[in-house]
Image (cartoon, rainbow, N blue to C red):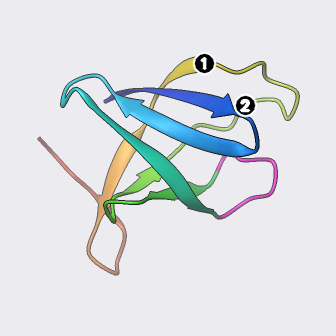
Amino acid sequence: MKVTIRRAGNELSAYVHKKDLEEPIVQVENESLWGGFVVLRNGWRLSLPDLPRDTQLPVTVEAKKMVNDAAQSETS
């Protein structure tokens, strides 16, 4: 799903285009942000692609929603 990651001050947020939903990012797996998962305030875990550390924000990427503790990708 298409997700736009942006920064406002010190806070990161994710806008999910398909759902017309914007939520703050409350947890990141990797300090560099890319190549790991992020957790949105609503509880969604999104797997982000591996991009260069210095990627400029805002940026729109193809992310995968992770479900269950096994972190399986959502198929819909």
Q: Residue farthest to the right?
A: 54
CA distance separating discs 1 and 2: 11 Å
Specify the quadrant that holds the C terminus.
top left
**Left or right: 53 in relation to 50:** right
Give 76 or 59, whichever is nearer the viewer.
59
| Number of numbered discs overlaid on the protein picture | 2
Which is more foreground, mark 1 or mark 2? 1
Q: Residue at x 63, y 19 (%)?
A: 58
Whichever of labels 1 and 2 marks the residue nearer the N terminus, that label is 2
- Label number found at residue 69: none
Q: Residue at x 29, y 22 (%)?
A: 17
Image position, residue 14 (x, y; %) = 47, 37
Magenta highlight range:
29-35
Residue 34 visible to an observer of this rendering? no
**Left or right: 72 in relation to 11:** left
**Left or right: 1 in relation to 11:** left
Specify the quadrant that holds the N terminus.
top left
Q: Which residue is mark 1?
A: 59
**Left or right: 32 in relation to 71:** right
Q: Is residue 61 above or below residue 50?
A: above
**Which amino acid type is shown beneath numbered disc 2?**
Leu
**Which amino acid type is shown beneath numbered disc 1?**
Val
- Label number found at residue 51: 2
Bin the neighbour count of mark 1 within 10 Å (Cα to Cα): few under 14, some 14-19, many 20 and up: few
Image position, residue 19 (x, y; %) = 18, 31
Q: Name the magenta segment's main secondary structure.
A: loop
